[in-house]
Image (tube, rainbow, N blue to C red):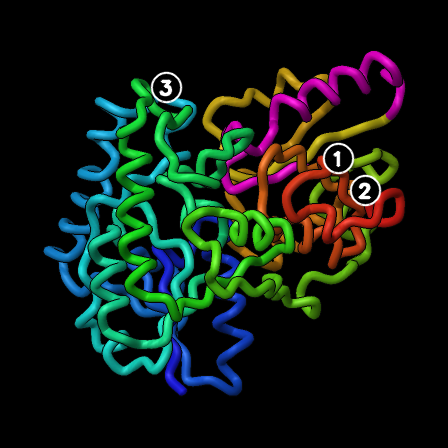
Amino acid sequence: MKVCLINTADHGGGAPVACKRLLQALKPKVDVNLLVQDKKSNDENIISTIDNSLDLIKAEANFYLERLPFIAFQEKDKSVRFAFSPANIGTDISQNKYIQKADLLHLHWINQGFLSLKNIETLFKLNKPIVWTLHDMWTFTGGCHYAGDCNHFLNDCGNCKFLRNPDDNDISKKGWFGKEEIYQQNKNIVFIACSEWLADVAKNSSLLKGFRVEVIPNPIKTEIYTPLDKASLRKKWEIDLDAKIILFGAANINDKRKGLIYLLEALTFLKKSDGNSKIQVLLFGKNKTLDISQLPFPAKSFSIVNDEQKLVEIYNLADVFVLPSLEDNLPNMVMEALSCAIPVVAFDQGGIPEMLDHQQNG
């Protein structure tokens, strides 16, 4: 069987990480490729849809053509800029040779100007079996990736809280109807949720109610994410051997959904209540706004970490990994920390409780 995985990129977030791990897990027994628009890795089984400079120009144009009108006329404020994807612009990949040769198409995260709803419909019309892994809620909402306290997706969206001028017929309602039309023509799609939480939400949504939804957690390479000698690593990275190390990381630590504000509040409280403790904070991920010199404890930033072995070493420097996310599916970083035998402190939300035993491993 030939399988084609489809994702916007092979880097830059949880979905690409999970998708590449699935690719590696399948390769020994399945003829599989990962088709992406934005490729940075050297993996020959990861194929870019961009073949030339014209393709690159079109891809970049699609990103801005989808995003700029939303920014100019639709978004409520800057904080929701990438929390909603209209999917009105994209690239037709239906004639790509890897799509044509595939016996099964496996969609993942396809936003930010890669595939539009029209492009998705065109793929479905190829009449190939479709599997779609949900990395967030976008597949069954009118356009938001995480709905928060909104339950409009249980009906038909509209009056979207992410929009500047929400109403009954806003772009979230149009997005909902666009997806409904596509799904109703393709009843044989199998949706995969990485967590029981997301599966339950999907099954109750108006768009996916009646569809087959299975739960398959993301894979992790436990032979790589494994406990290492903490003392030697702290010497290597010049981290105090006697300090209690609090680790926080995210693809973008400034993303409001990742809960940085709650970490800062907790650190401030900890400083006031136990200011004499020898504590150090380590961070990794994209950071444009946080001045780590203003944290109440000494801090060190590793910035964006693309090297997997370096990331494993960073986990093993810590005494605890903190994930104050307000909304998350099945965060790779929780699995990675636990696989390195690092306890995790997180909120009881999303798929996180499925990985943590309270007061046992977090």
Q: Is tag 2's residue or tag 1's residue first in the polypeptide sequence?
A: 1
Left/right placement of residue 319 relative to residue 74 reads right
Q: Secondary structure at mark 3?
A: loop
Q: Are marks 2 and 1 in contact (CB under 8 Å)?
A: yes
Residue 350 seen: yes
Q: Is tag 3's residue or tag 2's residue first in the polypeptide sequence?
A: 3
Q: Secondary structure at mark 2?
A: loop
- The reply to whether the magenta stretch includes residue 263 is yes
Image position, residue 77 (x, y; %): 37, 19
Residue beneath disc 3: 77
| Quarter containing the N terminus | bottom left
| Magenta part of the chain | 248-277
Q: Residue at x 47, y 45 (%)?
A: 137
Left/right placement of residue 91 relative to residue 226 reads left
Displayed quadrant of residue 327: top right
From the viewer's side, name the closer residue of 309 and 52.
Answer: 52
